[in-house]
Amino acid sequence: MKNLKRVLALLSLLFLAACAPAAEPVQPGGWVNGPINEAQPGASDIFVIPVAAAGDPIGIDFSGSVTSGSVRAVLKDPSGQILWEQAVPVAPGPFAYTTTLRPETPGDYQLGYAWEASTQATYSIVWRPEEMVRPGLTPVVLVPGIGMILVALAFLVYSLLRRLPFRYFLFGGLAWVVTVALKFAWAIPFNSPIYKFLTENLPDALGFPIFYLYVGLLTGVFEVALTWLVLRYTRLGKAPWRAALAFGIGFGALEAFLLGLNSLVGTATALLLPNVLPLSTLESVAQANSWLYSLMPPWERFFTVWIHIFCNTMLFLGVAQARSSRMWVAFLYKSLIDALAAWVQVAGVKDAATLWMVEGVIALWGGLGWWAVVRWVQPRYPAEEPPAAAPAPESEAATL
């Protein structure tokens, strides 16, 4: 146990070093979106765009979806005259247009949108002082989703080949669904005000790390502590090693499968229907055109499944040994790695080198989980009691 705690402490220091607050670069231009539900025609000017010299570019992306009526993007010159507009076809459905204008007259231009009578729609307008084009996509963008699904299937096949109790595999998947749903039920109403309070009332060097730790602790509370309570106070936790292992695999494999399926559906849609998606969505998906990015999600899922296996088998071990300290080790272990994930998401980390450094930490965490499961948890898990031997038949003399 001491060796395991020392390794956790070392990795905790790596985590704290990685989670320094990062300043997200300011993107020049502007972005706005929202609904339109208007009975009468009208217009709204949203952005004032300064053009310092003739020919300076104004990149515009206009996207959304129309239910009824019609909407169009409008750019007005410094005199208030319409320089450019992009109308949306009357037929209901999604739309997306991207263009770059180069006005010949310096001054302040106004960008907004206008609508006809009885219009119901949603819209998004993005502008940047640069050339704006919709990126092309290649089939490489499908690799993250396919890779994550293959990781899930590999662990499933392992469970089947080892003939692990399949119902415990399903119990583990169900536990992931329930605990993550409860975590989101808490996070959706509370995370934004907590983030605002911490970042507005504390220095950045303190407020941001506390928020990352808070997000990590949510995972510890819902995915670890809540699962522990269920295992501790129900018959589900009184299970042999093979069942505990199947539970942990199911917990991680279902997460990998659903994340992979969601990614695959999204990227396939972007690949097949790029002209109906917002530019921001296409740019996000286009990042996976590079193998440097597309291999990250399968890599991460493989090691994350081991993180789940370690945490859940530790919970079963704690039940078998009646020692809650096992739960607290799993709680700390999973909370810290999810705090690191929170930093990546909140800080908007996109640099490939930094992301692969994070993936390296995840690999260390998952590798520690694998080592602990094989070398520490399983050897300490109580062996299954052999079935009682059948009583020897009484001798004839005894019968008499």
Image: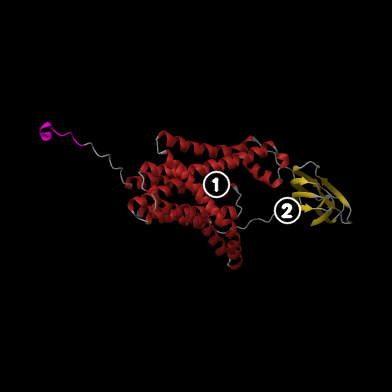
Q: From this view, report whether residue 156 is shown above or below residue 38.
A: above
For the question of whether residue 48 can be seen, the reply is no
Q: Is residue 399 magenta?
A: yes
Q: Nearer the viewer, residue 35 or 396?
A: 396
> Which dot marks residue 356?
1
Q: From this view, report whether residue 348 is shown above or below residue 200.
A: above
Indicate left or right for 169 with 376 as reference.
right
SS at mark 2 in the image = strand
Q: Nearer the viewer, residue 172 or 51?
A: 172
**Which residue type carries mark 2?**
Gly
Indicate left or right for 40 with 6 as reference.
right
Q: Quadrant of the C terminus?
A: top left
Position in image of residue 85 (x %, y %): 84, 47
For the question of whether residue 339 can be seen, the reply is yes
N-term-proximal mark, 1 vs 2: 2
Residues packed near mark 2 inside 10 Å, few (<14), some (14 to 19) or many (20 plus): few
> Which dot marks residue 34?
2
Position in image of residue 169 (x %, y %): 44, 41
Which residue extends farthest bottom? 201
Q: Nearer the viewer, residue 366 or 314?
A: 314
Between tags 1 and 2, which lies in front? 2
The residue stretch that appears in magenta: 391-400
- Residue in view at x 50 percent, y 49 percent: 178
Position in image of residue 98 (x %, y %): 76, 44
Q: How is the image coloured?
A: secondary structure
- Residue in view at x 59 percent, y 58 percent: 189
**Which residue type carries mark 1?**
Trp
